[in-house]
Image: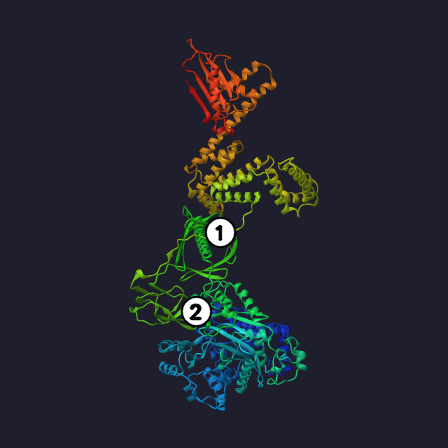
Amino acid sequence: PRGSYQMNGILNEAHNGRHASLSKVVEFCMALGGKTPIHSVLVANNGMAAAKFMRSVRTWANETFGSEKAIQLIAMATPEDMRINAEHIRIADQFVEVPGGTNNNNYANVQLIVEIAVRTGVSAVWPGWGHASENPELPDALNANGIVFLGPPSSSMNALGDKVGSALIAQAAGVPTLPWSGSQVEIPLEVCLDSIPADMYRKACVSTTEEALASCQMIGYPAMIKASWGGGGKGIRKVNNDDDVRALFKQVQGEVPGSPIFIMRLASQSRHLEVQLLCDQYGNVAALHSRDCSVQRRHQKIIEEGPVTVAPRETVKELEQAARRLAKAVGYVGAATVEYLYSMETGEYYFLELNPRLQVEHPVTEWIAEVNLPAAQVAVGMGIPLWQVPEIRRFYGMDNGGGYDIWRKTAALATPFNFDEVDSQWPKGHCVAVRITSEDPDDGFKPTGGKVKSGGGIHEFADSQFGHVFAYGVSRAAAITNMSLALKEIQIRGEIHSNVDYTVDLLNASDFKENRIHTGWLDNRIAMRVQAERPPWYISVVGGALYKTITSNTDTVSEYVSYLVKGQIPPKHISLVHSTVSLNIEESKYTIETIRSGQGSYRLRMNGSVIEANVQTLCDGGLLMQLDGNSHVIYAEEEAGGTRLLIDGKTCLLQNDHDPSRLLAETPCKLLRFLVADGAHVEADVPYAEVEVMKMCMPLLSPAAGVINVLLSEGQPMQAGDLIARLDLDDPSAVKRAEPFNGSFPEMSLPIAASGQVHKRCATSLNAARMVLAGYDHPINKVVQDLVSCLDAPELPFLQWEELMSVLATRLPRLLKSELEGKYSEYKLNVGHGKSKDFPSKMLREIIEENLAHGSEKEIATNERLVEPLMSLLKSYEGGRESHAHFIVKSLFEDYLSVEELFSDGIQSDVIERLRQQHSKDLQKVVDIVLSHQGVRNKTKLILTLMEKLVYPNPAAYKDQLTRFSSLNHKRYYKLALKASELLEQTKLSELRTSIARSLSELEMFTEERTAISEIMGDLVTAPLPVEDALVSLFDCSDQTLQQRVIETYISRLYQPHLVKDSIQLKYQESGVIALWEFAEAHSEKRLGAMVIVKSLESVSAAIGAALKGTSRYASSEGNIMHIALLGADNQMHGTEDRYVHVQY
């Protein structure tokens, strides 16, 4: 029963607020002269139409009744609508599920709509546009059940809603019409208004292809084949000759089954103008300004604007008055649009049709007329006269006009006025509207379907238009600019294509801006293949390469983790750093090598050129790419033909390798019929099948010539990528393939401008080193060179300190901040005067520690955490810049060892299993460790280079880590382990050198006895340790006494006991140090020994000459020995042995 359903449905809100809203609706209706209060509306439509009506009514109800829920809204929902999470279902107060499929099962099913309206107990039904909105059976059936139809009565709908009938009535009323198939039909106006005789109606129509041919030949080409019940681009085709008629007549019949069809002459180079009407139940007709809808493709509007600016205002007023007369003549009630064709050359206009419904572009009128049209429809449905509607009174400049919030005031004071005698003010601004459609402008505006990223979608039974954007401006130019900017902000991502970026180009075209467009303008652009602006080729290539690389890496990591989750052994190698990508873009094939240099950093190589790019993944799945100092937002969608990229709102396609032998469905659709037999031969670019997409019949063209082999059945639904048929190609070699691109990337700067400041460069190079240790790729030599250069810069600690202070200054305790800044500034001033260049780490640390000593425990703990970054920096510089360099290098060594020690002794699969168990709650850590280990070759090269540059001068500072390096036990580490062992030996040598130097120096300090000196030197001569290298390394010490003892000890150690006691003599020459001694031999001839110690090769000859001169008093004999020691200028011990020469003569 009706009552029980109400209680179980929308009327179960039996609280005071709901009763208050009901009473306000009744009060409003009666106060404004209405007859039937409307409390609830069944919205017999879906998609954008339903959502727009609901939002308009919500706004009006809130303004009028103080509650947006005062008028209850019930939606109809098909399974397809539910599947895509349709917007209108979520807005509604209640929804009723209805059968899916084509609209004859749901939104166009009059019996179903009436049954739902009765069952839910609604006051009214709103039909919207399309579907059942122009079916005269609907208002009659609703009226029979006492339900208000928010549209015209069936008599008016019969008279004007039918395109054939409206043309006959306009013709009878003397309104100019174009030549058409009913031009010869003459009927008195009074006969038309009652009911057009069936035989006269049939004479104006064509029912067969032959009749269509005859009519076209009579009125002349080009012509239009039109279905009387069509609209929105459906049931209409342009024909230029008899062959077109034969091919397209059945398509029109198929798109609007059962509809009468007529022929009309095409008026080329004309404008499509229209007038918005609103009529009440008392014969009052308001003309709410005009619109220009001349930008159309396939006779479906794409851009609408208002008011009309192409025609003189006097002509526009004529159009408005002619439309009003036509509506009054048939007793029209509700919203309607009268459409005209206007010749820019002659200034003449022709009646086109009357649409007995609200049209999708009605918000253009709402902007310029300031009238809420859906709300006005509800008011008219209540029986309220137009002169009582506050917004209508305001439109005509009447007293007591305004918004609905003042309805109580206007209801008492408003008086009737004659609509024939008043005139509205010309709009002060301009509005431009753009229809957003799920069509592919690059493929002749073919409809597409599928999911969108917002959570909704466009199903195969939906209209191709799914959005509408409106922009207002004080002038036409301002409105166009605002619209262009708005469209550039729109990003529609998903399986569908859209016309957004293409429409931006239309708005910026000179013809559109200068108002030189016509109804064929857009179709001409499409025929000339004028495409939307593409991203620059290199941005498409880089963006495509990065998207493919990131997608592949994500899949690889996901697969690797899945192995770990299941406890299985994953692949030994995962390729996440180096990859090669091939892209087909607009018939060119690009091959790019991508090298990952960090989490979001890449180098890309192509044909010898190299560029750098950064990329981050956005939370909505997009990519934010930084290239050449600019940012670009990228979204991608996989589809049948490849990957569609949306880069900064501009589209490009990464095409799959084209295989013309596979005929695929490009979008969700229904296979209507094959146009060729299975096994038949088809030529290239010839239709082989017809499909239904978005209620439109579309041909499928063969991409090449060959024999077709059908795989699907007629009537079968298809998804994008489904294989329809195979084509045995006549000439496979003739298939056009993408040509390799042999060019290079253009010159580009870094993704982000690099700072020239030392501390910034130091942070960059240090980060690069850490990325290498994490497994990524960087040029090792450059990284180390930059790092060493920065670490050695005197200004580095000062800049680092200033940067930290700029971050923490506002959070530090006031007294601490003041003292730090004061002392630091004073010190910097002294540095500027050349008094000191060292960083005052000790001074600053003492200031901080002194300040932290005061306060409560909680304050001290808080401040310690606060100054921790400052203290860490100061501690690293306690021993000067060298100490800080040790700190940095040790941290890098630790990064290496923390990973590689895991793999040193174990089998990789066992190591990964242990890691899996250890990090079971965060398996990404396992991936990170494995990735780092895979870069072991580069990592080892980095560590070896660091050892070469920074460890050799003082290996003792790294003794513990060098010991760990030397213990790494695998062939991959042998170079590193060997180098570490060498450095450890050098460390021991250094320690021994220090010990020897200290011992020999302390002899002088603590004893003056020569015998004590001899004892210590004797101990060194006979020591079991290999002290020779340590002694040699002290040859160049600046202490001459120490140098003398070292040289004597060295010679004695070499030749004891063959040395004549006390025979060693040292001479200091300009060329160097010369030592001479005698050997104790059994035979009579003496053997001599000599050593020359020089600091340059230039001094060797002079030093040898001096040594030989010193031995000239001895008789010449064989077996004499000379040692030559060449001391390096850099005093690096590791090279000393190479500079030591032993000569026997």
**Residue 49 percent coordinates (x, y):** 52, 73
Give the total number of marks visible in the rendering: 2
Residue tagged 1? 748
Crowding at dot 2, Cα within 10 Å, few <14 / some 14-19 / many 20+, comes out as some
Q: Secondary structure at mark 1?
A: loop
Asked where in the image residue 842 lies, by quadrant, the reply is top right
**In the visual, does 502 lie left or right of 19?**
left
**In the visual, does 425 lie left or right of 270?**
right
Amino acid type assigned to the residue bearing label 1 in the image? Met
Q: Who is closer to the viewer here, 588 or 621?
A: 588
Q: Who is closer to the viewer here, 151 or 4?
A: 151
**Residue 933 percent coordinates (x, y):** 45, 43
* Whether residue 251 can be seen here: yes
What is the CA distance from the residue labelled 2 to the residue labelled 1? 35 Å
* Figure colour scheme: rainbow
**Residue 897 percent coordinates (x, y):** 49, 39
Q: Who is closer to the viewer here, 599 or 855?
A: 599
Asked where in the image residue 382 lies, by quadrant, the reply is bottom right
Asked where in the image residue 1044 lies, by quadrant, the reply is top right
Crowding at dot 1, Cα within 10 Å, few <14 / some 14-19 / many 20+, comes out as few
Quarter that holds the C terminus: top left
* Whether residue 69 can be seen here: no
**Residue 1036 percent coordinates (x, y):** 53, 24
Amino acid type assigned to the residue bearing label 2 in the image? Ile
Of the numbered discs 2 and 1, the one sitting upstream in the chain is 2
Q: Secondary structure at mark 2?
A: helix
Q: Which labelled disc corresponds to residue 436? A: none
**In the visual, does 692 lie left or right of 366?**
left
Residue tagged 2? 526
Q: Who is closer to the viewer here, 851 or 547?
A: 547
